[in-house]
Amino acid sequence: MVRLAIGRAAAILMMAFGTVALVGSPAAAECQNTASFPAWLKGFKGEASAAGISERTISNALDGIELDPKIIARDRRQGFFAQDFGTFSKKLATENRVTNGRKKINKLRKYFDRAEKDYGVPAEIITAFWALESDFGKGMGDYSILRALATLAYDCRRKELFTGELIEALKILDKGWVKPSDMIGSWAGEMGQTQFLPKHYLEHAVDYDGDGTRNLFASDPDIIGTTAAFIKHLGWRRGEPWLQEVRVPGKLPWEKADLDLKLPRSEWAAWGVTAADGSPLTSDDLPASLLLPMGHKGPAFLAYPNFNIYVEWNNSLTYCITAAYLATRIAGAGSMQGRERDIPILSVEDAKDVQRILTSRGYDVGKIDGIIGSKTRSAVKEMQIKYGLPADSFPTPDLLSRLRNG
């Protein structure tokens, strides 16, 4: 899991869908390595020693370590998942994960209760991330984290970032929290069952089982306490909701469905938005954004201030809604409505065509990759308004046809 401003990639998602963590610039992706890896490693060991890390730790962790060209190749070609929300959430927010999340809560109730008392973070929030990131430890990844970090620190694309992360990983070893052989995980260097980069592991890990170490690979109590501590750090607001599936009326000012636009919940209620079961919304001033991940005909959600922690956790809105929705299901919410409706979905190539046309008309959609990110959605909304279509920011075959015809 990534705790930078750019969000974080889940190990299980990387393995299944090739997700990205820590996006670099296109220019950086074209850089060339010139120095040899052994020469770089020798220099790095000097940096680690200067940072106060013991020679024993440096030797145990790095002696004999080799470059992994496959990691560099994977990092250079990485791209966020392009699956539509319906497909993505159906594969990841499964009934099995709902069941296993509830079982985990029942089994470890005292630690979850302690975490909520200490940090205000409910058990279902922790278990949803835990399920998505590693299936409760079954999918942490099978890479040597030290080799991965050393490879990425050597590579010119994000050298400074991963040099720092490798230093932090060595500090964790120096503290005796885990052994080098324990550091098995993501190719991008993320660690433990809720996938922390070393910097965040070092800064936020807590000893919840009282054994004097902070082990996010094997200690359920430490995983629970640390994940709660980090979520609190991201800005969690005690006692408030995070996401609510809702039912929207046939007509609505669709252009207001935007994560960046927050209105009082009472205003959404006045426009006819209800709870998913048709019951009235609480009519109060709690800020909420309306999210329509598959357009105005698909599932709809109100995202509250606590949803912001998901955006800090991962910068894919598809992942964020899926993780937040899974937490609501573990907490007892019903199955999602609208996901199974017959909603026309653009192919990746058609989505690229939308981006090419929008770019030719002066819009900045970022990279033409078929991934409908925030820049593409913003441009789509403007074109929908121009054509008199529901401005829900969701590109459809109808919109593409209009774009192609001028």
Image: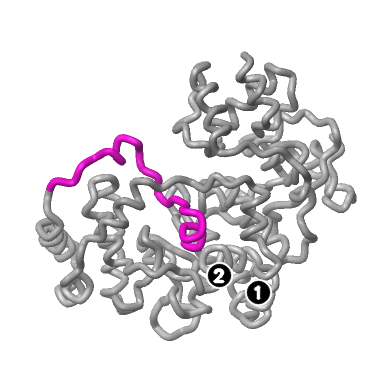
Q: Which residue is mark 1?
A: 100
Q: Is residue 269 above or below residue 337?
A: above
x, y percent for residue 17: 51, 54
Residue in the image at 51% along x and 46% along y: 315
x, y percent for residue 167: 25, 62
**Any mark on residue 241, and which?**
none
x, y percent for residue 358: 54, 22
* Magenta-tinted stretch: 11-34
Looking at the image, which residue sits at the far right? Answer: 279
- Foreground residue among 237 and 345: 345
Mark 1: amino acid: Asn
Q: Is residue 68 above or below residue 243?
A: below
Residue in the image at 26% along x and 56% along y: 69
Q: Is residue 88 left or right of residue 161?
A: right
Mark 2: which secondary structure?
loop
Q: Is 193 a magenta residue?
A: no
- Foreground residue among 205 and 275: 275
Residue in the image at 39% along x and 61% along y: 197
Looking at the image, which residue sits at the far bottom? Answer: 211
- Foreground residue among 341 and 251: 341
Mark 2: amino acid: Asp
Q: Which residue is mark 2?
A: 135
Q: Can you tell which quarter of the image residue 204 is in? A: bottom left
x, y percent for residue 171: 28, 68
Q: Is 24 a magenta residue?
A: yes
